[in-house]
Image (spheres, helix red, strand yellow):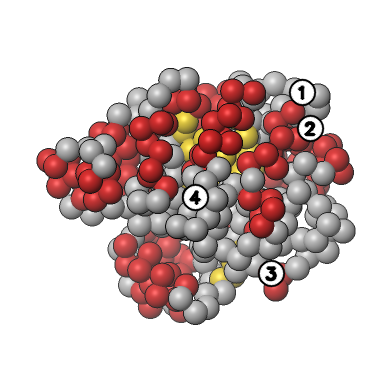
Amino acid sequence: MTDRPASSPDRGSSAGKPVDMHVHIVGNGTGDTGCWLRVHGWHRPLAGLMLRHIGLPATAIKGELDGLYAERLLQLVRESSLGAAVILAHDKVYDEQGNVREELGSFYVPNDYVLKLAAEHPEFLPAVSIHPARPDAFEELDRCLAGGAVMMKCLPNCHNIDCNHPRHRRFWERMAEAGLPLLAHPGGEHTVPVVRRELSDPRTLELPLRCGVKVIAAHCGTKSGLFDPDYFGIFVDMTRRHANLYGDTSAFNVPIRGRHVRDCLQSPLVERLLHGSDYPVPVHGHFAWLKGYVDWQTFRRWERHPNVLERDYRLKLAMGFPAETFCRFGRLLRSVHASTCG
Ligand SMILES: [Zn+2]
């Protein structure tokens, strides 16, 4: 663990290099990482597909997954145009009373593991995950801030977090005081079980926004599955009311999520966007080419590129996302303002 300050702009983004601010870490606990993973049913072939996509054998899931996955990711960042990747922890599910409900989750990545990886490798920036109903939520937040956390990540509908509940107000205020942004995933989710569907709506993020937290809505609220509601319009409307609401472009190279790329390139919305890949979610340029977001030569060139982080970055550059989109995360960290709830 280091005593690096929470909002240190001196890593990754400092050189003006692009940052991928939505990169998942997974592990099965090998190497004493504390991670766990439960993959059942149709998720098994999906997990194998994702591993092969990033250049690991599908059998890694039963092997030394944690080390293999982290090493591969490090190699991809180093061999890409990126300055850094923000790596995401994933907390357990808790009930309203703060009791852990481990049986409801499908994977766990402890904060200590992402903090350790980031302390060892300057290419990684640690995003921690803290359920605000945890009995030790404030202690954990302070501990993670001292450890160098650059962001907090949660999925309200999967983690069972009612962000608008008044009991969480102090937690959001503490995050705002510390200048720690919140990456929250609204909308449907198909890789992690949904515990409370009603918490999929981005309007569930109103209280942290009013408390002054810089909130990043993962995927801009676009839908994940064909039959999910599309919250993109609600997200856009909320950006007009909240100057501290942002969205990320993660998984925009997946057909369903990529439907709103043209809307996302329009001002003023484009000034609120941050680049994320959603690694290890597969990156393919077919949809971008079919929709006319990129031309044939661009598609052919980057579709063949073996580095999926670079492929995602290059395809999004070609789609027309301005250079600032890829560096905005660093600026989000620098402007730290204390605030209280309105
Ligand atoms: Zn994700």
Tell me the amino acid under the disc marked 2: Glu
Q: Which residue is mark 3?
A: 104
Secondary structure of the residue carrying tag 3 is helix
Q: CA distance from mark 3 to mark 2?
A: 28 Å
Q: CA distance from mark 4 to mark 2?
A: 29 Å
Q: Residue 2, can we see it? A: no
Q: Which residue is mark 4?
A: 223
The C terminus, quarter of image: top right
Q: Which residue is mark 1?
A: 339
Mark 1 touching mark 4, by CB under 8 A?
A: no
At label 4, counting other C-alpha atoms closer than 10 Å, the crowd grade (few under 14, some 14-19, many 20 or more) is: many
Residue 318 position by quadrant: top left
Marked residue nearer the N-terminal end (1 or 3) = 3
Q: Nearer the viewer, residue 303 or 91?
A: 303
Mark 2 touching mark 1, by CB under 8 A?
A: yes
Q: Nearer the viewer, mark 1 or mark 4?
A: 4
Q: Residue at image x 22%, y 44%? A: 289
Q: CB of residue at label 1: within 8 Å of ligand 1?
A: no
Q: CA distance from mark 1 to mark 3?
A: 34 Å
Residue 105 position by quadrant: bottom right
41 sits left or right of 259 in the view: right
Q: Which residue is mark 2?
A: 173
Tell me the amino acid under the disc marked 3: Leu
